[in-house]
Amino acid sequence: LHRVLMKDAPGYNERVFKRRITNDTLDTAVSLLVDFSGSMGGSKVATAIHSSLLLQQALAQSLRIPLEVIGFSDSGPSSIMMVFKTFDKPVSIEGLQERMLKGTAYMRSNADGEAINWTHNRLVQRKEKRKVMIVLSDGSPACSRSGDIDAYTKNVVKAIEAGHRSEIVGIGIE
């Protein structure tokens, strides 16, 4: 049998017949977890909000990477988780900024480990191949609950890293 290639066909035009190449390098979901504890007041929370808006613009709007933005604080007996933007619903930069500014009303203490674990459990439910959590915080956990909250946070992060189901990146604010 003689093999005929498409490019040898009469009237073939490369501009009309292109081979589609699927690139799944951006098959990624990102959870942005922002510390809304009392110590983040002033310029720290302003920097965190501004950084969140830039990430929203770069990842969700420009690259179309599913992004959720969550703030965390603590009321004493329990954690406060504020979902400012979900993965699947778009929000404008102005809308995200407004939601995050409203979240500053809940700035108290923080239980980082609980917030990281809660966010990780949401993230790993995503269908994307790569899952990345970015944590914006000014430092160590501080909440009024009993136990070593700092050690708990470190153990949560180690477990996430060991599980290889998602990546976790911490970015220090000031």
Image (cartoon, rainbow, N blue to C red):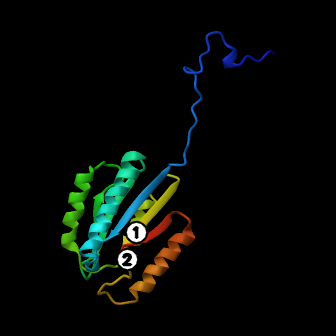
> Disc 2, disc 1: CB below 8 Å?
yes
Q: Nearer the viewer, mark 2 or mark 1?
A: 1
Q: Secondary structure at mark 2?
A: helix
Q: Residue furthest right?
A: 1
Amino acid type of the residue that numbered disc 1 sits on in the rendered structure = Val
Q: Which residue is mark 2?
A: 112
Q: Looking at the image, is 55 positioned above or below residue 71?
A: above
Disc 2: CA contacts within 10 A as few (<14), some (14-19) or many (>=20): many
Q: Position of residue 160 (x, y in %)?
A: 50, 70
Question: Which image quadrant for residue 118?
Answer: bottom left
Q: Looking at the image, is 147 positioned above or below residue 86?
A: below
Q: Nearer the viewer, residue 1 or 48?
A: 48
**Residue for point 48% across, 58% down:** 131
Q: Position of residue 101 (x, y in %)?
A: 21, 64
How many labels sit on residues?
A: 2
Question: Which image quadrant for residue 55?
Answer: bottom left
Q: Is residue 51 left or right of residue 108?
A: right
Q: Which residue is mark 1?
A: 135
Disc 1: CA contacts within 10 A as few (<14), some (14-19) or many (>=20): many
**Residue for point 33% across, 60% down:** 52
Q: Looking at the image, is 81 positioned above or below residue 57?
A: below
Q: Position of residue 30 (x, y in %)?
A: 43, 57
Residue 142 seen anywhere in this rendered image of the structure? yes
